[in-house]
Image (tube, rainbow, N blue to C red):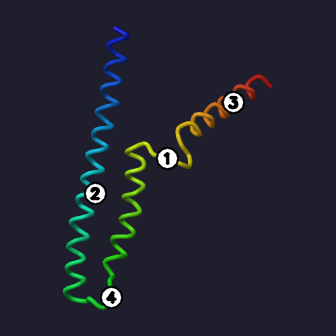
Amino acid sequence: MEKFNEEFERYQQAKKQVEDIKGFYGNLVAYVVVNLFLLFINLRYSPEYLWFLWSAGSWGIGLVFHGMKVFNYTPFLGKDWEERKLKEFMDQEKQQKYE
């Protein structure tokens, strides 16, 4: 029974990761479509100032962070940092209990 629970948990995690990836690609498609539309409007009605870049840039920054999260790319505060911090806090709590 325990093996079944492990398999089911692994399946649930994989399913969530696939859903996250689909969400990212949906966001990416929306980003491209909306910004192409804004580019068209910008060039059609006010080509002297490229204001659509504000939208593309700010949404693009969010898209980069979304992609980093979905594809588990964390160069700064990665998984190993998180695990070390968790261990540190657990050790501190254990030490406080015994004092």
Q: In 3D space, how far apart are the residues under numbered discs 2 and 4 (Cα atoms)?
A: 25 Å
Q: Give the residue furthest to the right.
A: 99
**Quarter occupied by residue 89:** top right
In the picture provided, is 28 more to the left or to the right than 96? left
Q: Give the numbered dot on residue 28.
A: 2
User: What residue type is disc 3 on?
Assistant: Glu
Residue name at image x 36 percent, y 65 percent: 59
* Dot 4 and dot 1 residues touching (CB under 8 Å): no
Q: In 3D space, how far apart are the residues under numbered discs 2 and 1 (Cα atoms)?
A: 19 Å
**Quarter occupied by residue 8:** top left
Q: Which residue is mark 1?
A: 74
Q: Which residue is mark 3?
A: 93
Residue 82: image location, x then y, percent: 57, 38
User: What residue type is disc 4 on?
Assistant: Tyr
User: What residue type is disc 1 on?
Assistant: Thr
Q: Give the residue furthest to the top.
A: 1
Q: Going from the N terminus, do you reach mark 2 or mark 1 first?
A: 2
Front: mark 1 or 3? 1
